[in-house]
Image (cartoon, rainbow, N blue to C red):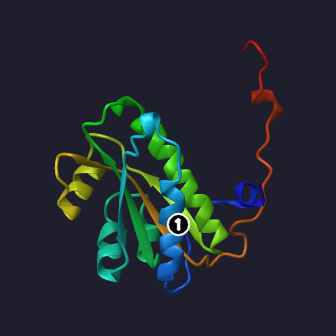
Amino acid sequence: MNTIFNRRSVRKFKAKDVEKEKISKIIRAAMQAPSATNQQPWEFIVVDEKDKVEKLSEFSPYSKMLMEAPIAIVILERQGLRAQEFAPQDLGACTENLLLQVVEEGLGAVWMGVGKNNPRESFLIDMFNLPKSIRPFAVIAIGYPDDENANKFVDRYDETRVHYNNY
């Protein structure tokens, strides 16, 4: 449970490469997520070439931290699934699994959403030459945190948001 309680969005990274075995564990954890009808709607692009990570930092006005990140993972949504309407929930679980494994590996990360039918989505489709059967879901910047407060517990519990049996 410490991993859940300690995970934070990390936006500052050390200039240190992330080991391939850590990347593999992170992707494996992501793929362990539950999915509707076991459709596993995910695919991934690991971006570890510095010039491509820097180019990726242009996909959104909120993605400039990618300039410092040694890697990024683009989470993709497969199209044409039997339970497509549940794919965003499946991908949310996949993304959270990924973020939790990042903490387990001693790394930091920040999740950047993409959205549908907007310039961010178009940028990623063009950058990665995605086929119509694949759509970008999220971009995750990953690296060794360069922040002393990274992955430290902050209590977010708010009893006023908990309801039993009725609102």
Q: Is residue 144 visible?
A: yes
How crowded pointer 1 is (Cα within 10 Å; few <14, some 14-19, many 20+) is rated as: many
Residue type marked 1:
Ile
Query: From this viewpoint, which residue is outermost toward the top?
Result: 166
The one nearer the camera, 66 or 83, is: 83
Residue 129: x and y, percent?
17, 60
Query: Which structural element holds mark 1?
Result: helix
Residue 77: x and y, percent?
33, 47
Q: Is residue 92 left or right of residue 85?
A: right
- All told, the count of numbered labels is 1
* Residue at x-position 42% and y-position 32%: 86
The one nearer the camera, 148 or 153, is: 153
* Residue at x-position 45% and y-position 79%: 70
In the rendered image of this protein, does residue 35 appear above or below residue 51?
A: above
In the rendered image of this protein, does residue 76 appear above or below residue 142?
A: above
In the rendered image of this protein, does residue 167 appear above or below residue 87?
A: above
The one nearer the camera, 13 or 44, is: 44
Q: What quarter of the picture does the N terminus occupy?
A: bottom right
Query: From this viewpoint, which residue is outermost toward the front?
Result: 38
Q: Which residue is mark 1?
A: 26
Residue 23: x and y, percent?
49, 73
Q: Is residue 10 visible?
A: no
